Amino acid sequence: MTPKPAAAAVRATVYGYPRQGENRELKKAVEGYWKGRVDAGALRETAAELRRSNWRQLTEAGLHEVPTGDFSYYDHVLDTSVMVGAVPDRHRAAVETDALDGYFAMARGTQDVAPLEMTKWFDTNYHYLVPELGPDTVFTADSRKQVAELKEALALGHAARPVLVGPVTYLLLAKPAQGAAPDFEPLTLLDRLLPVYAEVLADLRAAGAAWVQLDEPALVQDRTPAELDAVARAYRRLGGATDRPKLLVASYFGRLGDALGVLAKAPVEGLALDFTDSGAANLDDLAGVGGLPGKRLVAGVVNGRNVWINDYQKSLGTLGTLLGLADRVDVAASCSLLHVPIDAAAEREIDPQIARWLAFARQKTAEIAVLARGLAQGTDAVAAELAANRADLASRAGSALTRDPAVRARAAAITDADGRRSQPYPVRTVAQRAQLGLPLLPTTTIGSFPQTGELRVARADLRAGRIDAAGYEERIKDEIREVLSFQEKTGIDVLVHGEPERNDMVQYFAEQLTGYLATEHGWVQSYGTRYVRPPVLAGDISRPEPMTVRWTTYAQAQTSKPVKGMLTGPVTMLAWSFVRDDQPLGDTARQVALALRDEVNDLEAAGTSVIQVDEPALRETLPLRTAEHAAYLAWATESFRLTTSGVRPDTQIHTHMCYAEFGDIVRAIDDLDADVISLEAARSHMQVADELAEHGYPREAGPGVWDIHSPRVPSAGEAAALLRKGLEAIPAERLWVNPDCGLKTRGWPETRASLENLVAAAREVRAELASGRP
């Protein structure tokens, strides 16, 4: 459909933009501040310059309205907790002494005080800091950050729209504070929170805000009638305030469903909705509620979560239909561009043919501007852009790079037997215990050890040609021997080689598989100052040659203790990549699983008796609507079993997951049929152990006793206390002792001390069990 020119002026905008800077300037400044090399003033100036640069880029790209308040030193949900005064009691003194240091203490913890819990932001790989709320929580407004950033943008001449996490989503993301009843529902605090939001909105209006965006992505999940009533109550209260800017309620990551009718009736001036494939049903639903007469509709037609170019003709057709359903239609990405890299033009090593198919944040803002111009002025105004877009889409659809007949034939030949171990777990565990001879409460780590500055220098020297491959490999061997020696001296039972050769747990494999593209500058924030470079999955997947066998067997030759082979599982290989959108995800997962199956079988043939296939993204990728869970979990668990089921009964298969709501997928965890699973548990106080016990999980598990995403070193007593709590739910003969996650981001001093304490805790609890003490 070719839209007629819009009657009203069409605005182009985005909900948020990457924070880190083109060269990760924010990461370097924040970490420099933590280490004392950068003072607070320099950190704030770096942040201000990044904001100025982002707004300038957006305006120059043709956007008419820029977001403010989306910038964060660490996490936007943590910023919201500060804005509403929801600071846990254990951090209050630090925040009152120094707001910036107290902020980072909430995010990372200190040696004496634990940080806030961290988990995934809906079905993305972004991690947020979970608000801790209880019946005694007192909210107080602190709008300084939001007001200051708005004033910055206005002073530079930008039309600016502050962006806040909406009150309902904020409460639905929260958990009961320590000491609150486990069944306490933070949403019961809504009436206490709304006056604080109203105060912040009034402050923003006084500072010059014409519009404020309130993000409510939790509304694309299944919501109860009581929760929908809370939405209606919240926006009657905020919309009914007299001293406020216009309100734009934004939701994304899918279909609003019943919440759309509630918001359509609310006294707010605009809605922002997802109209990409994930939210396509919003178009029909919007027509079903009679549209949005008298309201502004911001249409998210450019995918903010993936990197493929937009289909202009399709998007303009959607926008043309929407013109009849709202008073005014503006154009945006489907969600914040936080989830994509900054600039595809920086990727010089990608095949030019494929580069035509890619759009990162800068390219997406250009797409939004083109679509806004086409909607406002008609398709003749963007005829050249439409023609180029059609050619690029045709290039991808017809490219031989995307299809491999041999891979497709192998995937089509998969049988049910390929996804099942040859023996059930009770038989396997007897064979594995005889093979491994491990003690009660065996100790291990998750896989990676600290990636030191020397390792990064060696990797950079190899890329730059300052050392040859032989010199680099000697450096890797030295590191492996050092890691193994430390583990043996510490008394760890199942060792790892530390992964010094790996740049990232997904990228390392993507670089060795056909069908994947690795980026050079495609950094995306995962949490805090942790950035990853998700590879791009462009074609069919196969494994030309072994990827990990050489280094695993080298490590095993240095020790008589078992050394785990370490792989990243098929679901995580998809979840932490930019996946192809031209075939079902399940089909792609089976291709990856077959490639990894070859690697697992080769590891076993080389003498590896313990093989870990990590799936930390299994919960993360769970669809946001319950009705879609079963179909997803069917192919997700099948792909894991396809990867791991070709080994002998005495080969022990491990998996690992971290920072997710495991209770939602505990049945699927069982369906993986792994022999051992290690899970994040330290920040969530062993909650997962109870969830496994409630389900009757029959295999071995290692709920973590060391929160590795904090620099603090847990004492042996603290780790032992967590172990004892774990033993209340999991029998000693099935309980492992391990950290929450890999140690790549930690330094060696804290790693040594923490692992020594972890082993001491295991020995202490073993002794208690041997003596019959509780």
Image (cartoon, rainbow, N blue to C red):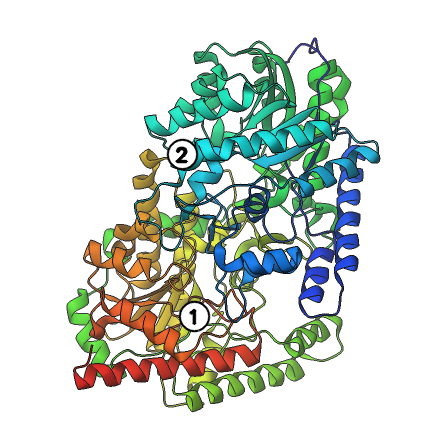
- Find residue 183 and report its horizontal and vertical position in percent: 30, 45
Tally of marks = 2
* Residue type at tag 2: Gln
Query: Of tags 1 and 2, which is closer to the observer?
Result: 1
- Find residue 343 and report its horizontal and vertical position in percent: 71, 46
Label 1 vs label 2: CA separation? 32 Å
- Find residue 528 and report its horizontal and vertical position in percent: 59, 56
Q: Earlier in the sequence, mark 1 or mark 2?
A: 2
* Residue type at tag 1: Trp
In which quadrant of the rendered image does the C terminus lie?
bottom left
Residue drawn at (79%, 53%) of the image: 45
| Pointer 1 residue | 706
Left or right, 218 with respect to 54, comes to: left
- Residue 570 appears in the picture as rendered: yes
Determine the image quadrant of residue 654. Answer: bottom left
Q: In the figure, 49 relative to 253: above or below?
A: below
Q: Determine crowd level at label 1: few under 14, some 14-19, many 20+ residues with C-alpha closer than 10 A.
A: many
Residue drawn at (43%, 12%) of the image: 288
| Pointer 2 residue | 221
Residues 290 and 522: in front is 290
Secondary element under disc 1, as helix, strand or loop, is loop
Q: Determine crowd level at label 2: few under 14, some 14-19, many 20+ residues with C-alpha closer than 10 A.
A: some
- Residue 13 appears in the picture as rendered: no
